[in-house]
Image: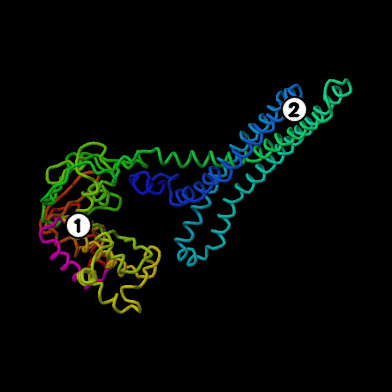
Amino acid sequence: MCFEKVVYMEVSWFDEGEHSSGAIGARLSTDAASLRGLVGDALGFVVQNTATVIAGLIIAFVADWQLALIILVLLPLLGVNGYIQVQFTKGFSADAKKMYEDASQIANDAVGSIRTIVSFCAEEKVIELYQRKCEGPIKNGIGQGIVTGIGFGLSFFLQFSVFALSFYTRGLLVSAGKTTFSAVFQVFFALIMTYIGLAQSTSLAPDVSKGKASAASIFAILDRQSEIDSSDNSGMTVEHLKGEIEFHHVSFKYPSRPNVEIFNNLCLTISHGKTIALVGESGSGKSTVISLIQRFYDPDSGHITLDGIEIQKLQLKWLRQQMGLVSQEPLLFNDPIRDNIAYGKDGEATEAEIIAAAELANAHKFISSLQYGYDTIAGERGVQLSGRQKQRVAMARAIMKAPKILLLDEATSALDAESERVVQDALDRVMVDGTTVVVAHRLSTIKGADLIAVVKNGVIAEKGKHETLINIMDGIYASLVALHMQLPILR
């Protein structure tokens, strides 16, 4: 349930530091295990010990109510001791949880970037950083152990103190002839049962503290309502989608960077069946246009329409099903190449459809040359394939989806000129009646677009076809082309 909730969170939630992959992984594993331990074995012990305490008190009251009353007056001392332990260990548990999340994030980053670490001979640095992050939990554990040990010792001290006081009191009563020796022993053994139950319960204080911290962490996820929830089936669908997209006076800032303005009153029309290329300097907001179209984020003001309908009014899952995305660094899953391509059709594609999509993406030849062909495992994040191979597989996955709107974010940047030409021809055939939004730096990719929009300072500074924009004296597009023409990639 917790994992399901995480998957349906809006993208901006993952931009926050406390929701990094390491922190979320720690929550789903250690927090769930701590909570399971609390409601499993620990809960069973509590029920057992509660029954033991009640039974002991009943036996004691039946045998000698006066002595039992003395015991009952002293009983809260152990309860106070347990409460103090819980309060002390609460802080330790919360601190340790944060430290473990930080250490988990470092380990997660190290494993995911092991090739970079090895190439820079940074193994010792990463190990040292991980050990430094683990020092906190170790010290925290020592402190928690000291508190728990003192509390456990104190509970035994109180227990035997009550025993001594009880024996002394009953000894006086026996010598005075007001009670019998057998009644004293009945109460004594009932007393032992009661205090054993209480002592075992107080020993669970660290587990209770961990469980409470874990429960708070997990329920913080479960109780939070995603602001952009793809599991919500409410909203409209369009039977015959054309794919015309319009940005109406859109202003936007990333929630994680509220002081950095990305768009300021941006207006843009993307006609259906056309290809629009977004160009501009790095960080100008080109990729943000694609993120807003897919509703990874919502604008701060203004609105975006699809075929004249605000995208917030459309069913989110249906909206994203109409789009195919290929990014600069495509993510492949640790599954066979066949399954990665079939992912574009919810994993239900036939072998013929998979091969056809691969051929259109110019990927069939290299896949067939692999030892296991389409059954080759791509590896974590596609690590077993080269950058060009990953992009072609990702392109095949997008083609498999047969989208009405194709979003290409530097999708051909890792392809050579020949592969790019083949893939571009294939996309032109696939997207005959579809809308294509391209973010690119390559002149060969840009100049064939039906419309080029130049993004600068949060607005569309220039737009038009390549032939028009290139001839604008001191124009932004012309300047970008002149600058990039010096690079081999644009020749």
Disc 2 is placed on an element classified as helix
Q: Which residue is mark 1?
A: 406
Q: Position of residue 136 (x, y in %)?
A: 60, 47
Q: Amino acid at mark 1?
A: Leu
Q: Is residue 428 above or below residue 405?
A: below
Q: Main secondary structure of the magenta part?
A: helix
Q: Quadrant of residue 314?
A: top left
Q: Is residue 236 left or right of residue 342?
A: left
Disc 1 is placed on an element classified as strand
Q: Position of residue 339 (x, y in %)?
A: 31, 66
Q: Quadrant of residue 160?
A: top right
Other-residue count near label 1 (Cα within 10 Å), few / some / many at <14 / 14–19 / ≥20: many
Q: Is residue 293 left or right of residue 199?
A: left
Q: Position of residue 352 (x, y in %)?
A: 21, 71
Alpha carbon distance from label 1 to label 2? 83 Å
Task: Please tell me which of labels 1 and 2 falls first in the chain.
Answer: 2
The residue under the point 64% across, 46% down is 141
The residue under the point 29% across, 75% down is 367
Q: Amino acid at mark 2?
A: Ala
As rendered, which of 150 and 227 lies closer to the eye? Answer: 150
Q: Is residue 364 above or below residue 109?
A: below
Q: Position of residue 248 (x, y in %)?
A: 17, 40
Q: Which residue is mark 2?
A: 63
Q: Is residue 471 left or right of residue 147?
A: left
Instruction: Name the quarter where the C terminus is drawn.
Output: bottom left
Magenta stretch in the rendered image: 415-435
Q: Is residue 449 left or right of residue 66?
A: left
Q: Residue furthest right?
A: 175
Q: Is residue 427 magenta?
A: yes
